[in-house]
Amino acid sequence: MERHILHINIVNFYIAVAQALSPKLRSYPIAVATAGANRRAIIDISECARQAGLYRGMLLDNARRKCPDLVVLDPAPYAYSRAHNALLSEASHFSPLVESAGPGHVFIDLTGTSRLFGRSIDIADKFRREVKSKFNLENATGLSTNKLVSKVATRVIKPAGLCTVVAGCEETFMAPLPIRLLPGIDYKIIQQLHQFNLHYINEIHRIGQELLYQAVGSAATDIYRFSRGIDTVPVREQKAPAPCIEERKVLREQTNDSMLIQRELFCLVVNAGIRLRNMGLAAGRLHLTITYYDGLQSSRTVTLRTPLNGDLSLFDQFKKMLALINTRRIRLSSMEIRLKELSYPYGQLDLFADNEKERQLMEVLDTVRNKYSPDVVKFWRIPEKCL
């Protein structure tokens, strides 16, 4: 059956929510900046502010000098959550397969719903109009046979409108577009492609995957596939349990020796990392629980700004969490780690842009392990980078 995947994109979601709550803000340049920090940075801006030369990540002091009439807002997590949940609720009226893809981003699988609601293009247009009328949120809507092309379609027409890509035309649609519109490509990878005079997607088709590998390394496989509009990742039902990787270790000898505890934690992370990469995923949320010999537990959860799947990077995060929760001078009896919010690779091509050595190391180790057995290669000790 031909797939029909709808993607709705509320462009500049934080700004859009603020303007929906206070329409008078639409006539001003607006920025949402980190709250309570000594050096506040911009995390979202309006189109008016963008035209004034502002951008995400810009320090607020510099932004005020460049745009004196800038209206600065603190983040409003509760308002954002309510708006996004309302969007998901509205989407669930059209299909049971609705997936959240970040604040203001929703995928809907309309496959097989035509008998109930009519043609998918009519559903897409109806949903887009209802979001505008009910929630006062302008939106860009894309419709195609897969998630990737639908997402790109919203980037082509943003901030508002409807773009439909007919089945069989995915590659033709993608060909003339700039490479920067492909989801998940880090700025550094784009710069590498530009150095090889590759600016548009059809230029990737001409050189082929082998030459592309010489330019960007292992990311070439995904970039080449996505450039042709190929994506088989399904829309995951929200009610289905989110995938999660768990590893638990009961210490043979209860101890409060920090080096021994870190060594055991590192083994847990390595085992979880192997499973994570074999699934082709990356973790966006980490959870650590430690149990003391008297039965009391302490835990901590961290949400990562950029999802990770390298052993060294993951261990660095878990080690910081361990230092924060292991505050009692009592021996530990067990530890448990969980990797949550696992994301698919097409949105994570920039994971190792700043750590090429780790990426190459993990790739070699996983190749050997998959060919023979997971235990054929082990770390003899914690790498110096992690100490």
Image: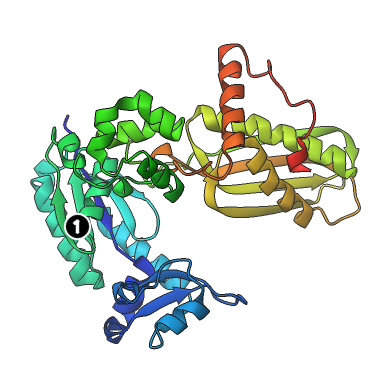
Residue 268 position within the rendered picture, expressed as x and y whole percent measured from the top left: 70, 34
Residue 353 position within the rendered picture, expressed as x and y whole percent measured from the top left: 51, 43
Amino acid type, callout 1: Ile
**Disc 1 crowd, CA 10 A, few/some/many (<14, 14-19, 20+):** some
| 280 left or right of 338 in image | left
| 124, above or below 357, in the image | below
| 312, above or below 378, in the image | below
| The one of 120 and 113 positioned closer to us in this rendering | 120
Q: Quadrant of the C terminus?
A: top right
| The one of 125 and 241 positioned closer to us in this rendering | 125
Residue 296 position within the rendered picture, expressed as x and y whole percent measured from the top left: 80, 51
Q: Quadrant of residue 233?
A: top left
| 261 left or right of 216 in image | right
Q: Is residue 327 visible?
A: yes
Residue 316 position within the rendered picture, expressed as x and y whole percent measured from the top left: 69, 46
| 63, above or below 8, in the image | below
| 191 left or right of 287 in image | left
Q: Quadrant of the N terminus?
A: top left
Disc 1 target residue:
157
- Spot the residue most to the top: 372
Q: Quadrant of residue 12?
A: bottom left
Circle 1: element type? helix
Q: Residue at x 69, y 19 (%)?
A: 377
Q: Is residue 185 visible?
A: no
Q: Residue at x 61, y 35 (%)?
A: 358
Q: Residue at x 42, y 42 (%)?
A: 192
Q: Residue at x 38, y 47 (%)?
A: 238
| The one of 61 and 321 positioned closer to us in this rendering | 61
